[in-house]
Every structure is written in C-alpha cells, then in structure tokens.
Image: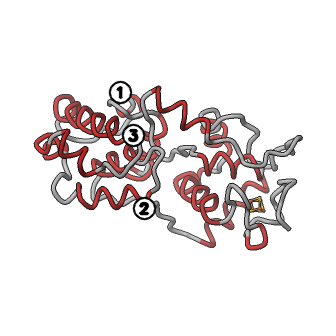
Amino acid sequence: MSDLKPSSRRKATKATAPAKKPARQPKPVDKATVLEIFRRFEAANPHPEGELEYVNPYTLLVAVLLSAQSTDVGVNKATRQLFPIADTPQKMLALGEESVRERIRTLNYFNTKAKNVIAMSRRLVEDFGGAVPRTMEELTSLPGVGQKTASVVMNIAFHIPHIAVDTHIFRVANRIPLVNTKTPLETQEPLEKLVPGEFKLHAHHWLILHGRYVCKARTPECARCLINDLCRYPAKTI
Ligand code: SF4
C-alpha cells in the first residue's frame, strides 16, 4: 500500500472501487454504532499488527513503498533478500540501484520502485541525517512517498494515528457504511474524523485485516462477521 509515480498511480486507483456497489448506498451508521464496531474489533484483536516485515522505521518505509500493487507476502519474500544487507539508507545507497532492482524483480513496477528506494535513501542521507522524518510534510517530500505511505509509516513506526486508506479500507468503510465516498483518497479525512480517538491508532489495521480476510471484495463472509448485525450493506451474503 504505497504511492507510485503518476503513471502507475492511475492503475492503482482504477482497481479500488467496491466490487458490488449497490445502486443506492445506505446512510452511514451513527456515532454509537461506530463506537460499538470498533469496540468489537478491539475485543477480537486488541493488538493488531500489519503483515509487512521490517526491522526499523527505514525498512518499514521501504517495505510500504514496495507494496504498491504487490501483496505483502510478495514484498516480504523480496525484502528477506534485501534487509539483511541494507537496513539503513546508507547501506542501501552502497548496495546501489542495480542490486536493489535484482532483489525486488518479482514485484510489479520493480524498475520504478528500485529508482524510488535509491532516490528516497539519498534524500534521507542528504537532508535528514539518515533518519526517517516524522511529519507528513517531510515524509511526502521524499521521492515515491505519498500521503498513503506517509500515513502508514507515521501510524506504525511512530504511533501517530493515521488511517491510510487502501482498497480494503475503502471497500469496508463504504459497505458498512462508515462513510459514503467515491475514492480512497477522499476517504481518509472523514474516516479519521469519525473514528473515536481511543481506536484511531489501530483502526487502520482492524479495517485492513477485516477487508482482507472477512469482508472480501468478491464475496464477503458475512456469516462469520463480528459486526454483521450493525452493517447496512444491502448485498450481505446472509
Ligand atoms: S456484514 Fe458482510 S458486508 Fe458487512 S462488514 Fe461484515 S462482511 Fe462486510
């Protein structure tokens, strides 16, 4: 779940619409229901974790950058070849673009991603003393890093609550619905306003995991959904 250059970003946006959008979307659920939804997510999984492997904020940033249009499983396979020898921007620069490319060639857009990893590492060394910055403005100034990647890094590495909206979160949020939005990009702000403060840090993981394993794109598994009675999705499977 990362941000690619404009040419590839177009493709990423195209694939994000909910699979079976009903003709008329119901109104978003009320505040009490939102609270109950996140209470249940928390009770079921108090300490949710993402599935990308990393060892420090820098490797998390690289992993998220590599995850655009690729699965976490695929990214983890590639980074297991990369991070043991390059877990800092200095080591990544020493490794060089060609070697990075070779280690990530199983991933979509590996050419662009290798270029971005090197350019981003260079900026970190030259302008940030090799450390990953903590603000949205600084993070999004790095090559290949957009709002979504920055939000994930801030949330996971620095525990600054943000809800980076990927295709899963967009689908789940519009099915329940927590929001009525047309694109992932326009979903983050209303979602961050809506989710109660105490749940904001983990909301990103709860919604992604729910979308990935239960509220699946083609056929949501509503029979085993812990918020089934609260969800207003007209095409529920039970
Ligand atoms: S009831 Fe079905 S559609 Fe609603 S959130 Fe659960 S899995 Fe998704």
Residue linked to disc 3: 109
Query: In this rendering, would 176 be left or right of 115?
Result: right
Residue density around tag 3, few if under 14, some if 14–19, many if 20 or more, within 10 Å: some
Residue linked to disc 2: 73
Residue density around tag 1, few if under 14, some if 14–19, many if 20 or more, within 10 Å: some
| CA distance for labels 1 and 2 | 28 Å
Q: Position of residue 210 (x, y in %)?
A: 63, 61
Point out the frontmost of discs 1 and 2.
2
Residue density around tag 2, few if under 14, some if 14–19, many if 20 or more, within 10 Å: few
Residue 36 appearing in the image: no
Q: Residue at x 24, y 59 (%)?
A: 81
Location of residue 203 by image quarter: bottom right
Element on which disc 3 rests: loop
Residue linked to disc 1: 141
Q: Earlier in the sequence, mark 3 or mark 2?
A: 2
| CA distance for labels 1 and 3 | 21 Å
Q: Residue at x 18, y 51 (%)?
A: 86
Badge number at residue 171 = none
Beta carbon at label 3 within 8 Å of ligand 1: no
